[in-house]
Image: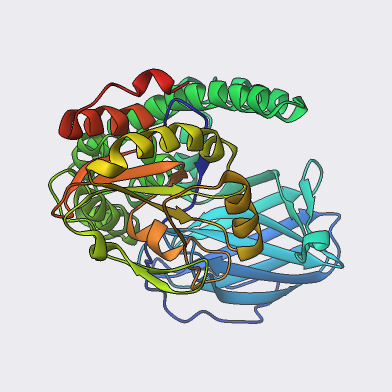
């Protein structure tokens, strides 16, 4: 998944929703006792005061969040009630003054208690960027939710947790670097350690799901790993894990989300037809990928703000110079949401091949064509044959360069790759 250089992770997912029955609003602080087919979540936040709380459904892909219950907060206490078809990880948001506090709880039809303290919360003031003031509540204990117990066991597993401090350290050092190359060298180190942690997480989930194949929380944990580490997982690993789940787990939206995206990813393996698309060029005229049928095509997913992407441009200029006359076309698809930044980068880089900019149909969500091609990080490349079928799908410059030499001949350019 990762190229040899540091890459920028993108969030690319397909939509999924969990069915939730109607929930009651404005419950008293005492709340009613939950039956086996309903939930009753009592929350007590120390020294919090009054405010308003929301219980938010996010779905497997975090798109289209939906408030399913909202209640007043009195002296830091409130209660959510309702019914769930299946257990689900939900977000609790508690607003007081200018700040909104948030934390996750695995909700299920049971009596659940949350004892929390705002001490130690992580605060994020996004007002200068047009956002809001919010804080991640770190100090809280959940009782009465077996699913939450499993989630906490997973999060605190020593084989997984041992990597956290190392990853954090490398990222902190990277932010202290004044030189971009040095910064991304440390990010590269963090990525390497993250791969080790992903392997440890995968082993934990594999062991747990084999012992508890119908566990919805197991499917949730795997969906989280897939969402944020898909590029570190081999297709065979994902396929094997999906086969572990049965019953409620296999019918959950967490499972369906992974299975659906896995199917789309398999359709992007070599030999499959590349998805066609139409995007606008700098002059706002339309470009359609299939118009290049009959030529070898490399699709380059990049962005003006992506340092590794721009580092790779000199190499692709050499590749283009060597193979364009033999029938190679390059199409750079920018992930820039602001055209001014995209145009400025093109003026600087002076790339002689086709340039188009991706579209963002949903605010704060991934780009349309990047999502179509399941690009979870950039730079990323897709090499097509003359029939528009995929030859290479990779973030590795060398993999693309070697395949071009194989099919088009000429001297090797792999030595130009750092």
Q: Position of residue 111 (x, y in %)?
A: 52, 60
User: Relative to the observer, which residue lies in front, 320 or 392?
Assistant: 320
Question: How many marks are shown on the rendered structure?
Answer: 0
Q: Position of residue 102 (x, y in %)?
A: 68, 57
Q: In this picture, is 353 found above or below 25?
A: above
Q: Which image quarter: residue 184?
A: top right
Quarter of the picture holding the N terminus: top left
The reply to whether residue 338 is in sight is no
Return the x and y of residue 354 as percentages of the image width and height.
41, 56
The coloring applied to the image is: rainbow
* Residue reaching furthest to the front: 325
Residue at the location (51% across, 56% down)? 335
Please state which of residues 229 and 317 is positioned toward the viewer in this rendering. 317
- The residue lying at 36 percent from left, 40 percent from top is 320
Residue 324 occupies which quadrant of the picture? top left
**259 sits to left or right of 232:** left
Q: Is residue 411 left or right of residue 407?
A: right
The residue lying at 79 percent from left, 40 percent from top is 120
Please name whichever residue, 298 or 189, is drawn nearer the observer in this view of the structure.
298
Percent position of residue 259, x then y: 25, 53
Q: In the image, is residue 329 above or below residue 308?
A: below
Q: Is residue 43 above or below residue 140?
A: below
Asked if residue 14 lies left or right of residue 42, the reply is: left
Image: 77 above or below 5: below
Asked whether the viewer can see residue 138, the reply is yes
């Amino acid at each position: 998944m990762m190229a040899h250089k540091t890459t920028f992770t993108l969030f690319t997912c397909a939509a999924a929703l969990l069915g939730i029955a109607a929930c009651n609003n404005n419950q008293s602080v005492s709340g009613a006792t939950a039956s086996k087919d309903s939930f009753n979540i009592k929350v007590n936040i120390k020294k919090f005061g009054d405010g308003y709380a929301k219980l938010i459904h996010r779905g497997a892909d975090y798109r289209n969040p939906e408030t399913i219950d909202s209640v007043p907060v009195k002296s830091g206490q409130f209660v959510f009630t309702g019914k769930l078809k299946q257990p689900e990880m939900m977000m609790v948001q508690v607003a007081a003054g200018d700040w909104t506090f948030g934390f996750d709880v695995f909700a299920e039809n049971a009596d659940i208690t949350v004892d929390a303290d705002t001490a130690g919360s992580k605060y994020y003031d996004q007002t200068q960027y047009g956002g809001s003031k919010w804080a991640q509540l770190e100090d809280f204990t959940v009782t009465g939710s077996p699913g939450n117990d499993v989630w906490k066991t997973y999060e605190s597993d020593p084989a997984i947790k041992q990597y956290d401090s190392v990853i954090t350290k490398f990222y902190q050092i990277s932010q202290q670097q004044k030189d971009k190359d040095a910064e991304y060298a440390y990010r590269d180190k963090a990525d390497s350690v993250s791969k080790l942690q992903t392997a440890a997480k995968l082993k934990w989930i594999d062991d747990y799901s084999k012992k508890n194949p119908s566990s919805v929380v197991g499917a949730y944990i795997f969906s989280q790993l897939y969402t944020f580490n898909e590029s570190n997982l081999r297709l065979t690993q994902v396929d094997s894990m999906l086969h572990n789940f049965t019953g409620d787990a296999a019918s959950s939206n967490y499972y369906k989300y992974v299975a659906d995206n896995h199917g789309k990813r398999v359709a992007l393996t070599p030999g499959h037809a590349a998805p066609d698309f139409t995007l606008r060029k700098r002059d706002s005229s339309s470009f359609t990928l299939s118009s290049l049928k009959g030529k070898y095509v490399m699709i380059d997913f990049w962005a003006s703000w992506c340092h590794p992407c721009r580092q790779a441009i000199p190499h692709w200029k050499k590749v283009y110079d060597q193979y364009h006359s033999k029938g190679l076309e390059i199409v750079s698809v920018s992930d820039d949401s602001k055209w001014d930044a995209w145009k400025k980068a093109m003026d600087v880089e002076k790339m002689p091949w086709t340039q188009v900019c991706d579209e963002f149909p949903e605010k704060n969500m991934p780009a349309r064509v990047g999502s179509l091609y399941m690009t979870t990080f950039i730079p990323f490349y897709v090499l097509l044959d003359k029939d528009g079928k995929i030859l290479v799908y990779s973030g590795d410059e060398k993999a693309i360069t070697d395949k071009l030499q194989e099919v088009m001949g000429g001297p090797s350019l792999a030595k130009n790759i750092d």
